[in-house]
Image (cartoon, helix red, strand yellow):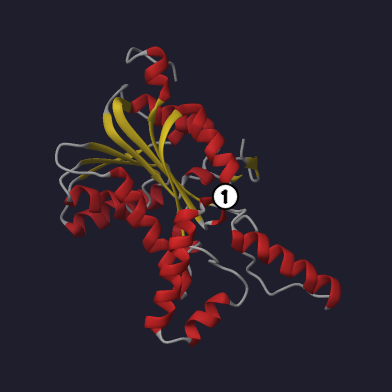
Amino acid sequence: MAENMNPGKVGRNWDDADVLPAVLSRDTEFVFRRMTEETLWAAQSGNGHRILDVGCGRGIDAASMAKKGGVLFGCEPSRVMLRKAKEYVQDAGERVRLVSSLAEGLPFPNNTFTRVVCKGAIDHFDNPEQAVLEMCRVASAMGKVVIAVANFESLSCVLGKKLNGLSRRFLRREIPRPHIWEIPVDHTFKFDYPAIIALANRHLRVEQIRGVSLLWGFPRWSKVLQAMPRALALIILRSLDKIASWHPAWSDVLIIAGRPVTKERWGDGEMGR
């Protein structure tokens, strides 16, 4: 199971304004965009699909899927983020039904959704295992669950820790923060490739494992990219992203998609929460 870092951090007043930098570096902008693209591609939302976005945040992804013809629901425990989501989807002119809820106790009947999406949120939950069980419960037998999460044992994290160790040993100082391998204070769990694969295999018949981006946050990497012409930086980022797709364990973000295995074991009848 993923390592529990900060239990009890899920809050009704959590605000992503305290997390996101005012200006995104080129590698951060790239990884966020690719994470969204690959998550929504894995969901393959379209006309007639009933879709739940778990931990929907500002509602940006939910509005995007609604635009493709999906019937969208979003759940979010933070009152602050729900307010932002309502404003965003209203401005976007899309219909998304927003609900205040923890992922560990989704307020929907069994087999409600053809797609359940959770992007960048599962490592904020108090109980990821229970959250995945709930996602499987509300997904239909032929539905799909898609989970995207940061990999805190990525190549960038591993090399960054080694470089920091060398700096401490020979220069008697640490590399300037932020350190990409350190778990942010608003995260409750540390996920890496073995942990998310083990969690997914317990509850899903995994159909897709996708890695996104390499070297995000590696010391001084964003400065190197910023010094390049933008077109060249994008070519390098895309090339590294291709390597990440071939070797997900190295990647900065992991995306898992599959069908609920519990439906296969016990059928589509009542499943306990």
Neighbour tally class for label 1: few under 14, some 14-19, many 20 plus, Cα within 10 Å: many
Q: Where is residue 229 in the image (x, y as percent from the top left)?
A: 41, 87
Left or right: residue 93 compared with residue 269? left
Residue 94 visible, this angle: yes
Q: Kindly state the secondary structure of the residue where label 1 is placed.
A: loop
The residue drawn where x is 74% and y is 69% is 164
Residue occupied by mark 1: 187
Taking depth in this image into account, of 63 and 193 the one nearest to the observer is 193
The total of numbered circles placed on residues is 1
Which of the 4 quarters of the picture holds residue 6? top right
Q: Which corner quadrant holds the C terminus? A: top left
Q: Say what amino acid the circle numbered 1 marks.
A: His
Locate residue 96: give its quadrant. top left
Q: In this view, does 185 lie to the left or right of 72?
A: right
Whether residue 15 is visible here, answered yes or no, is no
* Residue at position x 52%, y 56% in the image: 251
Residue at 47%, 33% (x, y): give it: 131
Is the N terminus in the top left, top right, bottom left or bottom right quadrant? top right
**Residue 143 relative to residue 273: left or right:** left
**At x 56% / y 68%, what residue is drawn?**
217
Q: In this view, does 169 lie to the left or right of 224?
A: right
Identify which residue, 250 or 97, lies in the foreground: 250
Residue 101 pos. (x, y %) = 39, 36
When the figure is inspected, residue 110 is found, relative to residue 252, above or below; the finding is above
Rendering coords of residue 21 (x, y %): 48, 70
- Between residue 92 and residue 66, name the one nearer to us: 66
Q: In x, y percent, where is residue 186?
A: 56, 52
